[in-house]
Amino acid sequence: MKRIAVYPGSFDPITFGHLDVIKRSACLVDELVVGVLVNQSKTPLFSANERVNMIQVATQNLSNVRVEEFSGLSVEFAKKCGAHLIVRGLRAITDFEYELQMAQTNRVIDPEIDTIFLTTSLKYAYLSSTTVREVASYGGDISHFIPEELIGTVTERVMERSPLKLNK
């Protein structure tokens, strides 16, 4: 049986921390589906389609990774993909409490789907998409946080939406 896992998230934008989890979890399964969440209650910096495209660029060298957008429950998305695993990354103990509750809820919804937690590598433990957006909004260097090929896109979008409108 093919081992398929999903790694759901908003990825707005994808960071080196996300890529760390993607690369490590892709080594554990035959196929990894990165699920880009469409959340109607949030206004993301990038559309779901833009986020899918950015992740495809960042993961193009990983042959067993594909990227799809989805809405609704992660456990339902996993079932749709034929996955029996949901991958979640943990940066700190504060992430664990929420993620454990979600994993237990998902297990009640579908006992056939398990959640695996990967702790983010220490060098990315501080990193979040929010951090990237904030640093970029002040004109800071985000090259330590996201792939080089995405820097221009992210910087331009953040500056379009930033109330600071820094002149560079």
Image (cartoon, grey):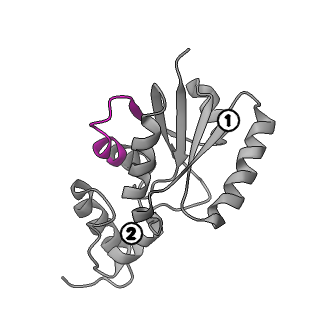
**Magenta-highlighted residues:** 54-68
Amino acid at pointer 1: Asp
Image quarter for residue 152? bottom left
Residue under circle 2?
132
Amino acid at pointer 2: Val
Residue 76: % across, % down: 66, 34
Regarding residue 114, the answer to whether it shows in the image is yes
Relative placement, left or right, of 96 versus 17 is: right
The secondary structure type at the circle numbered 1 is: strand
Q: Which mark is residue 19?
A: none
Residue 66: % across, % down: 40, 33
Q: Which mark is residue 114?
A: 1
Image quarter for residue 165? bottom left
Front: mark 1 or 2: 1
Residue at the spot 40% in from the left edge and 70% down from the top edge: 133
Q: Earlier in the sequence, mark 1 or mark 2?
A: 1
Q: Residues within 10 Å of mark 1 (few under 14, many from 20)?
A: some
Q: Quadrant of the N terminus?
A: top right
Residue at the spot 81% in from the left edge and 38% down from the top edge: 108
Q: Quadrant of the C terminus?
A: bottom left
Q: Is residue 168 above or below residue 47?
A: below
Residue farthest toward the right in the current orientation of the protein: 108
Residue 78: % across, % down: 61, 32
Residue farthest toward the front in the current orientation of the protein: 122
Regarding residue 37, the answer to whether it shows in the image is no
Residue 148: % across, % down: 22, 58
Residue at the spot 29% in from the left edge and 70% down from the top edge: 142
Q: Is residue 69 above or below residue 122?
A: above
Relative placement, left or right, of 149 versus 18 is: left
Q: Is residue 90 above or below residue 81?
A: below
Foreground residue, 1 or 37? 1
Foreground residue, 67 or 17? 17
